[in-house]
Amino acid sequence: MTPLSLLDDGPLAVGTPQDGVFGPNGESEPLDLLDVNLHADNPWPLYTWLREHAPLYQDANGLWHVSRYDDVVHVAMRPEIFTSTLGNRPQLPNDESFIHLDGDVHRKRRGLIQGYFTPSAIRRLEDHVRHCVTELLDDVIEQGSCDFVTDVAARLPVRLICEMTGVPPEHYDAVREALDVFVMGGNGPDWVTEEVNSAFFDFGSLHMMLVDERVDTPKDDFLSLWLNAEIDGKRLTEDQVLWEHTMMMVGGSETTRNAISGGVWMLHEHADQRDLLVRGATDFDNAAEEVIRWTTPFVSMSRHLTQDYTLHDTTMRAGEEVVMLYPPANRDPRKFERADQFDITRTFDSRVLSFGIGRHVCIGAHLARLETRVMLEELCKRMPDWEPAGDLVWTRSSFIRGIKSLPLRWTPGPRVGSGA
């Protein structure tokens, strides 16, 4: 168990930490928590320090950060106080997607596609997800090595979300490459570069081409649904359709690729737990949930205060921005036994926050869990001796947390799909 000293909820340093210490290394000035380098490699000493010593921390940008489990839930569950309508990435404006709506208007817009992501709907996708995983592993298994992120983990979710939204297969690679660039704009205003804007323009051009096709020939996909849906007698605008499509592509690709690649790395690091899976001695659903807790693919989301509000005896002002840090919340010892241990057999007494909570919980959370579980099952069956074949490279980002490159090798095996 965690020492009691870490669980003491007595006087704490909030906003301006006590004794002029602003970080785990004795920093004398507030940290810039939009600095991408703080969240790469090993950010856990920082995350632990924030959670245990400064659970409400105002950084160098004037952004408030909460890092305890209950505080993240508190912010997420009170949209009337912490609104999504002014943007959900720090210091970046809102767009026309439903994640920047609250209340009934958010419920109605989200509801256009909500039914495709219910647990029962996702269960019906399992055979297809397994087919996609089988094809991806068939493409690499005979050669005995690959970069697991670029060749496998990143391709699975992009394929599935492209299928759902209506992007043809010949564009999958281009979409994935554009998303890899575009998502970096989520790090903050300094990262909205010409390259990021160009990547968004490229995706937007593809989107408009597909829209023109759907106007003439609707199909059974989200793009056709968005174009033809009516809410309170009104159709979505061109910008709303574009941003719904963009939001689905980013959310549907980044979470799963980072969970899968991070899980593969951790199961290498903990060979005893991988052995449990290979031998069928533990449950893959539970393993996938621990992978999702441990990796926490998104670093943060933010909200804006609609009024003055006091938390941890510190008053924040209306209009200020509050950032929810998910990784330290997912390792809060108040909520998870042995929170700093990777344990695929753990009992989850608290809900994992990797996909958020409340009305803005990630709409694709059940799909991400399915993809992660099926990938782990097939890997443990077909290439159970995977090991690193080069250096792991972390993505440097204050928005997403994941592995950019993961070279692996294994004993080559046979193809098993239709092309075997």
Image: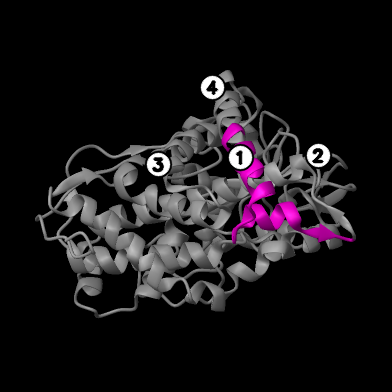
> Do tag 1 and tag 4 residues touch (Cβ < 8 Å)?
no
User: x, y percentage for residue 48?
Assistant: 51, 49
Which residue sits at x=55%, y=52%?
Answer: 166
Q: CA distance from mark 1 to mark 2?
A: 34 Å
Which residue sits at x=28%, y=40%?
Answer: 392
Helix, strand, or loop for circle 1? helix
Q: Earlier in the sequence, mark 1 or mark 4?
A: 4
Verify whether residue 76 appears in magenta.
no
Residue under pointer 4: 195
Amino acid carrying mark 4 in the image = Glu
Q: CA distance from mark 1 to mark 4?
A: 18 Å
Amino acid carrying mark 2 in the image = Glu
Q: CA distance from mark 3 to mark 2?
A: 29 Å
Q: Earlier in the sequence, mark 4 or mark 3?
A: 3
Evaluate whether residue 78 shows in this view.
Answer: no
Q: CA distance from mark 3 to mark 1?
A: 37 Å
Query: Between tags 2 and 4, which lies in front?
Result: 4
Judged from this view, the residue extending furthest toward the top is 194
Residue under pointer 2: 320
Amino acid carrying mark 3 in the image = Asn
Residue under pointer 1: 207
In the picture, the disc for residue 42 is: 3
User: x, y percentage for residue 381?
Assistant: 20, 69
